[in-house]
Image: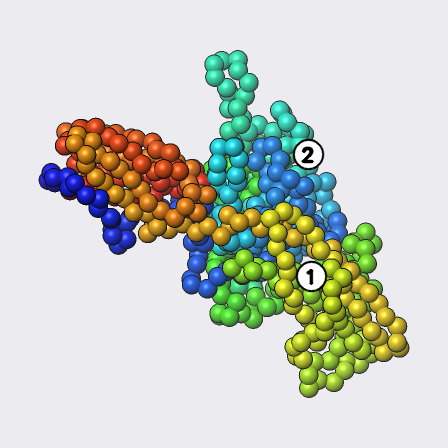
Amino acid sequence: MQHPISHRFFALPAALLVMLALPHHAVANDGRNRYDTGVPAELVHLHAPVSAQAGFRVLASDMPGGADGDPAFRWTTRPALALVRLASRRTVEALGAGPYPLAIFDLASENADTPIGFGPEGPRGRHPGGSHDGGHNLDLGYYLSSEQGRIETPDPAACTDHFRQGAPAGAAPVEDNICHGPADRLDTDRQTLFMLELVRWHSEHFAGELLEAIGIDAQVRLKVLARAGDWARSRRFGVTTARVAEMERLFASSPYEGWSHSHHHHIHVRLLPMHAGGRHAARIAALVAQDRALEARLLTQPGAESGAAADGCALVTELSSQALTRSLDLQIVGTEPRCALAGAGKPQPAGAGLKRLRFRIDGGEWSAPEDPLSPMHHVVDAPAGTAFSTLVAEAELTFADGHLRLLKRTVAMPAQPGWLRVRIDASHFVGRARTEGNELLLALDFPPVDATLIDHIAFLVHRRGVAAPERVVVDVRTAAAKVQEAGSVEAVEAEVGLSRRMRLRVPVVVR
């Protein structure tokens, strides 16, 4: 039905603003966490390993070929962090340290959104929309036997051949982000054991309710399943056919589900969301406790961070963020019985030599733990800046014999740029239309701060008798346009692109 065009502006009610009918996983990179339940997600920062014996590594910076190394995007949930560190350590204990251990790629942004990069072309999601929301999604590089690449070195892919032939014939090969040949550079044993260890925690400790999926390249999948099957038949490492079957069920590499490409150099581990106070609360607490004990043991080993452990005590630090407000968790973890303090109402443990404890950061005022039930644990506010920095955390320990011990840790403080506070919603956008003679004047109103994540705005003008809409791209700063022959216009929509990963469609009322 044709509607006459009024000679005034029409504001579209917020209730009529709609988004494109995109799949759930395709909508993000807009400052929002798709797992949001009304309570801001609490994420922790995965810092560099404290020892080579931790079994994993972080990259110094983003690498050519898509390997991610920006510390600003290494935020995750506490169970996810513990799971990765425990599984990587188990791999070292069983098989020794490999030449190229598991590398930590992107996890989530500090605001729990999928990471966004900014360049000359504007904002661009570093991953498909929604794929890294919530801190439940982790990209983990493969264990490799070599990083010698066909075109570039270092090459973090598990296979040498991940290119397609360029055009025209004879042109240089083009990156295709998928293994076209065997995973010839995969450290198969370590990769297999690491993934089986993830599945062991999932099956044995969380009743199959820890992992949702593991994105993996098809060629890597073939090698890992073959090795896991061999181990199940020989019962090596306690592997069972049931565990291998569950790992295969979790594997995702189908091109029809969007998993086939871009996993030539990493797996994508997706955990099921779990509330810390829910039915798995005790299991989560046990997982985290094991991880903290592991961190303390690693700090006591040769080659670990200097000054962080002594006299059977280790200073364990953890940077967390909730609604972009940071806290630094400081804890003394005893690696020997003498490093202990009694909680309220409890006697001093036998053989304990610790008498008093206090903490400080960056040379500030000393403060003692405030919770009488947790006398070796303290939490302080942590600063945030727009650039990467570090701070020094210290713990002063006084022992029963009178001697003092000062422990120190250098804590990484990833950048917290202002755009992390931008949260875009379809209800922010109001389309307007007005006729002037033969012209239709179009405008789109929205909060100016939203422009931070907008990569384009276009009006889609549907004319009577024309199948395809006329696409009118406009300047994001003005978000306005004029179109001719107003009388032939039946409908108008505004298309808003967000971080090159998401598109909103806002109907503009034309009457």
Residue marked by disc 1: 317
Name the kind of residue labelled 2 in the image.
Ser
Between 1 and 279, the residue placed more toward the observer is 1
SS assignment at label 1: strand
Judge the density around disc 1: few (<14), some (14-19), many (≥20) Cα neighbours within 10 Å.
many
Q: Are marks 2 and 1 in contact (CB under 8 Å)?
A: no
SS assignment at label 2: loop
The image quadrant where one finds the C terminus is top left
The colouring scheme, among rainbow, by chain, secondary structure or one colour, is rainbow
On residue 491, the disc is none
> CA gap, disc 2 to disc 1?
33 Å
Residue 315: image quadrant is: bottom right
Residue marked by disc 2: 146
Q: Nearer the viewer, mark 2 or mark 1?
A: 1
The image quadrant where one finds the N terminus is top left
Q: Residue at x 53, y 49 (%)?
A: 418
Lower position in the chain sequence, tag 2 or tag 1 = 2
Q: Residue at x 70, y 52 (%)?
A: 390
Can you see residue 355? Answer: yes
Q: Can you give x and y, in whole percent of width and height, for residue 85 in the image? A: 65, 55
Q: Can you give x and y, in whole percent of width and height, for residue 326 in the image? A: 59, 60
Q: Can you give x and y, in whole percent of width and height, for residue 414 in the image? A: 63, 50
Name the kind of residue labelled 1 in the image.
Thr
